[in-house]
Image: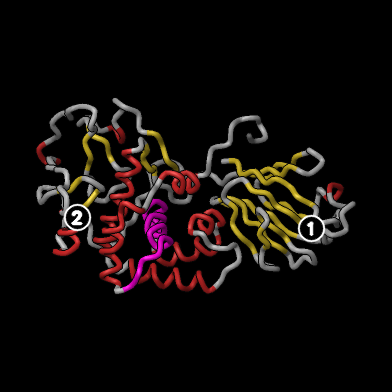
Amino acid sequence: MDMSGKPTAEPFLAQIDRLIDLRPFSLLIGAIGARMHAEVPAGVVKMLLLARWYGMGEAALLEACQDRISFRRFLGLALEGSSEDVRLAESYRNAAQFPMEGQNLIHAVEAQLLAKGFSVRPGMWAEASIVPVTEGIVMGGDTSGELDFSGAPDGGRIPQAAREPAAPPAAALVETRIFQPGELKELADTGESALVRGVAKMTATAAPVQSGPVELVPPAGPEVPAPSACVEWASGSTTEFSGELNIGRDQRFCPNAVELKADHHVSRRHAVLSVCAEGVWVRDLGSRNGTFVDGDALPQGQAVLVDSDASIRFGPHCAVRLKVCR
């Protein structure tokens, strides 16, 4: 529950982690590994998904994987950077050199989500989201009776299994069929340039597949405003803010020093919380006893981006609840 008593939605990447199962895609992952001449870690597959759903190029994605706490959790990385970060980044760079195989895998994952009744709504500066697909409702304003993968670069569609789709316009006519046993292996062996979406294959009548890295176009409309945030103190009182909130026992530095003055493990100038479009930056100011996000210590004097609700602890005892309000 948030401060207003409304239910707090499960974070997007936590939903994705719960819904997707990469095991059925071993052939598609193996096709990338064969081109790389190396094993493809699960984290690389997830980075390919992040790049698509958040519309990030390589540099922006690698930076976000350093900063965003939800990305690090999704990838299974510790809050503090390690040699695993370097290995994963290098594997991702290698995998990204084969966009066709990467797109095949991404579309297969999206097909799996669709089969479970969900579709991904891509995000740019705003958080991506996963939305249920309701029977009888056509996504994206299409009246052809087919469901659309949000942001798919080729505009391909997968028909609803529950009913016979209406005939699409001639220009958009696409033939689909079910893979027979052994066809996926044949596809991997022959390198056939068809677009695979889990169980559907788009034939040569489909629009040509984009050969470069997938990039998402931000939705039209007004710029997404920066979120606000709220801190719930141990006393039960709350502080809402939309800019910066200083944390410390110095009353000239922190407007809420009264909440902290009894805890001498909190430094006089301990940390700063800064709201931005993506969430809240939590920055430790070189405090004596450290700053912790959901139990993980921040590197002293450094910051992480918190893009969903989290528990923040200043020193060993002073814990608060940070709510990100969008």
Q: Nearer the viewer, residue 64 or 314?
A: 314
Q: Which picture quadrant has residue 159?
A: top left
What amino acid is found at the position of numbered circle 1 in the picture? Pro
Q: Which residue is mark 2?
A: 184
Q: Which residues are magenta?
A: 38-56
Figure check: 245 above or below 134: below
**Figure quadrant of the C terminus:** top right
Q: Secondary structure at mark 2?
A: helix
| 24 part of magenta stretch | no
Label 2 CA crowd tier, 10 Å (few <14, some 14–19, many 20+): some
Q: Secondary structure at mark 1?
A: loop
Please say if the residues under marks 1 and 2 sit with CB atoms less than 8 Å apart.
no
For the stretch drawn in magenta, what is the main secondary structure? helix
Q: Position of residue 184 (x, y in %)?
A: 19, 55
Figure check: 247 above or below 88: above
Left or right: residue 273 versus residue 214 is: right
Q: Which picture quadrant has residue 321?
A: top right
Q: Which residue is mark 1?
A: 316
Q: Earlier in the sequence, mark 1 or mark 2?
A: 2
Residue found at x 75% / y 50%? 319
Residue found at x 53% / y 64%? 66
Left or right: residue 277 versus residue 105 is: right
Number of on-image labels: 2
